[in-house]
Image: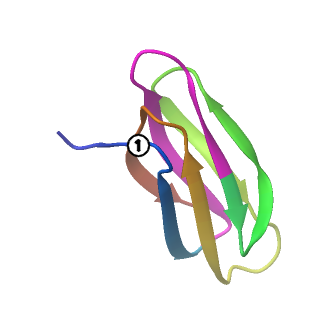
Amino acid sequence: GERIVAGEGARLRLAFHAHDVFLVLGASGESGSVEVSVDGDRVGAVPITVDDLYTLAHIPGEKRDHVLDLRLSPGTEAYAFTFG
């Protein structure tokens, strides 16, 4: 009850102020994936195989404002963000 489950074409955008972005993710049934962009630049894809805390981005340097864009494969479950 405390999660979102991605449908076809699911996207999420989040403004944040941190060095690191983490998200508790899982996949209903099979594995999933999350494509990650920060400030419009693609930083990679995260394969989701088990329910766990995944690192989405690590941004070196001084902390500042950023925009995170995620594209989640259908069935990917997202629970809670944390930041560092």
Picture residue at 51% right of the left edge, 20% below the top? 50
Q: Which color mode does the image show? A: rainbow
Which three-letter amino acid code belongs to the residue tagged 1? Ala
| Residue plotted at (50% across, 50% down) | 9
Q: Quadrant of residue 48?
A: top right
Which residue in the rendered view is the most extreme toward the left?
1
As displayed, is residue 69 above or below residue 52?
below
* Quarter of the C terminus within the rendering: bottom right
Residue span colored magenta: 18-35
The chief SS type of the magenta part is strand
Left or right: residue 65 versus residue 59 is: left
Residue 63 within the magenta-colored segment of the rendering:
no
73 w.r.t. 82: above or below: above
**Whole-percent x and y of residue 66?**
64, 78
- Residue 26 in magenta stretch: yes
| Side of 53 where 2 appears, left or right | left
Q: Residue at x 72, y 75 (%)?
A: 39
Q: Position of residue 11 (x, y in %)?
A: 50, 57
Res. 3 image quadrant: top left
| In this view, 8 is above or below 62 | above
In the picture as drawn, the residue positioned furthest to the top comes out as 29
Question: Is residue 8 or residue 76 the one in the foreground?
Answer: 8
Q: Residue furthest front?
A: 8
In this figure, which residue is indicated by the disc labeled 1?
6
Q: Nearer the viewer, residue 60 or 25?
A: 25
